[in-house]
Image (cartoon, helix red, strand yellow):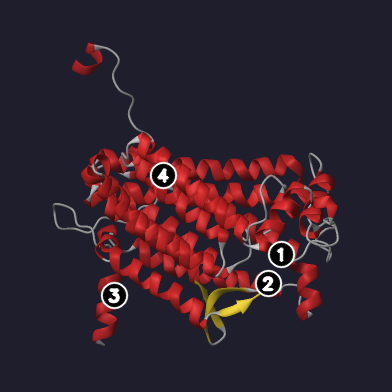
């Protein structure tokens, strides 16, 4: 009985008004609407792109749709818990989350499950955890906490600027040993953007980017399979049935889609031509079925979501909610960067990386973590409005500022 009493208290919003009452939890309709739009597109496209593969592998064409729905249910529960917790709770355990994910990255190398030559998953019975997805969110939370606590040092001192780089470097090294080059790039670039926007001096930032770029280039060229990927990226048609097979099939999908596409369900590339089209290369199926126009609409939705998150970050920073603002900046950067890389890979603009399209691709861990991150953003917006005393309707439809002195007196 005590457990359920504690659980009920924990689920209640942790923010109190001056009158001691708990305000009703309101969420930003733009973030909710854009996120649900992307999730809905994901459900439709996972169904469309996985049907032939699911029938061939399991005999049930809706196998991956049911699993995708199950992951969405878990993500909804995780989002519900995050929405009910004060964001300062995240800040209090930021270091613990970082230590936990670093330990898990080490455990992946020792005990992880190997799939297609990569160790990226910790197995717990029939469930698996892709630690690199957790690392994206937990490193952002740690960086937001560090930049809030040590902002002056980051702006003025080399020590404060370099200290978080040790954490980023160790995390990147663990990810590269899995190997997971895509997650390494996303986490590293996201942290650099957060530091720059937090006030790091430009010349430090440029120097850091040059060093990091050289390091990533050396890493990319040091492994034979990565070198083959670069060669394939430069000329996928040199080996269309070998190393360049997946990219050439993706490019064929883009070509068949043309401007307006072949129509929902009419993709040919998903019929065993494009391997596992419902995961990393789902963009190719979208382009084939809905054309460049459909793809541009999808990218517009992503852009609107990221811009809205940055607007919330700006307003939070104006109210001295630095931790929350930096967290939102990191989440927006992470989502935008992963979208750009995923679309760039599928269209042949970037070398092949194993990154999903947020909210759209099939993939349980990525889906759960990104929806949890959106719940964090919604909670930040809620707390920001409570701190400012503004209602949701007033925040969405602010009264225009007076233009004349007579309007002020009126």
Q: Is residue 143 above or below residue 301?
A: below
Residue at 18% x, 53% y: name it: 17
Residues under labels 4 and 2: Cα distance?
42 Å
Residues under labels 4 and 3: Cα distance?
47 Å
SS class of the residue under badge 3? Answer: helix
Q: Which residue is mark 2?
A: 64
Residues under labels 4 and 1: Cα distance?
43 Å
**Residue 87, image x and y in percent?**
29, 58
Q: Which residue is mark 1?
A: 47
252 left or right of 42?
right
> How many residues crowd around disc 4 within 10 Å: few (fewer than 14), some, or many (20 or more)?
some
In the image, which is nearer the foreground, mark 4 or mark 2?
4
Residues under labels 3 and 2: Cα distance?
34 Å
Looking at marks 3 and 2 on the same chain, the residue that comes earlier in the sequence is marked by 3
Q: Is residue 31 visible?
A: no
Residue at 67% x, 73% y: name it: 116
User: Mark 4 touching mark 3, by CB under 8 A?
Assistant: no
Looking at marks 4 and 3 on the same chain, the residue that comes earlier in the sequence is marked by 3
The total of numbered circles placed on residues is: 4
In the image, which is nearer the foreground, mark 3 or mark 2?
2
Q: Which residue is mark 3?
A: 8
Looking at marks 4 and 2 on the same chain, the residue that comes earlier in the sequence is marked by 2
- Which of the labelled discs sits on residue 208, or is there none? 4
Looking at marks 4 and 1 on the same chain, the residue that comes earlier in the sequence is marked by 1
User: Mark 4 touching mark 1, by CB under 8 A?
Assistant: no
């Amino acid at each position: 009985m005590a457990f359920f009493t504690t659980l009920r208290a924990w689920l209640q919003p942790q923010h109190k008004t001056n009158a001691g009452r708990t305000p009703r939890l309101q969420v930003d309709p733009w973030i909710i609407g854009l996120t649900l739009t992307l999730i809905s597109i994901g459900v439709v496209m996972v169904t469309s792109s996985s049907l032939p593969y699911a029938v061939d592998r399991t005999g049930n064409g809706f196998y991956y749709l049911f699993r995708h729905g199950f992951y969405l249910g878990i993500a909804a529960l995780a989002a519900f818990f995050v929405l009910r917790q004060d964001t300062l709770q995240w800040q209090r355990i930021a270091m613990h989350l970082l230590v936990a994910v670093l330990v898990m990255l080490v455990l992946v190398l020792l005990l992880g499950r190997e799939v297609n030559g990569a160790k990226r998953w910790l197995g717990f019975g029939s469930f698996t955890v892709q630690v690199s997805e957790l690392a994206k969110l937990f490193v952002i939370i740690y960086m937001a906490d560090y930049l809030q606590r040590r902002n002056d040092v980051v702006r003025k001192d080399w020590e404060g600027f370099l200290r978080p780089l040790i954490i980023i470097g160790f995390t990147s090294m663990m990810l590269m040993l899995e190997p997971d080059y895509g997650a390494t790039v996303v986490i590293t670039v996201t942290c650099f953007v957060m530091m720059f926007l937090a006030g790091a001096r430009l010349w430090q930032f440029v120097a850091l980017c040059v060093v990091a770029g050289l390091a990533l280039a050396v890493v990319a060229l040091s492994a034979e399979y990565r070198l083959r990927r670069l060669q394939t990226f430069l000329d996928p048609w040199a080996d269309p049935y070998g190393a360049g097979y997946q990219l050439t099939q993706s490019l064929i999908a883009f070509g068949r889609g043309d401007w307006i596409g072949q129509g929902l369900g009419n993709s040919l590339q998903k019929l065993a031509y494009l391997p596992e089209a419902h995961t990393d290369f789902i963009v190719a199926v979208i382009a084939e079925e809905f054309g460049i126009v459909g793809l541009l609409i999808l990218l517009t939705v992503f852009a609107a979501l990221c811009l809205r998150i940055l607007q919330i970050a700006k307003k939070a920073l104006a109210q001295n909610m630095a931790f929350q603002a930096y967290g939102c900046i990191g989440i927006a950067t992470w989502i935008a960067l992963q979208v750009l890389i995923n679309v760039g890979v599928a269209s042949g603009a970037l070398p092949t990386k194993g990154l999903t399209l947020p909210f759209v691709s099939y993939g349980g861990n990525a889906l759960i973590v990104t929806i949890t991150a959106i719940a964090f953003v919604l909670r930040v917006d809620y707390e920001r409005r409570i701190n400012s005393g503004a209602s949701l309707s007033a925040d969405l439809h602010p009264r225009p500022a007076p233009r004349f002195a007579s309007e002020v007196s009126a």
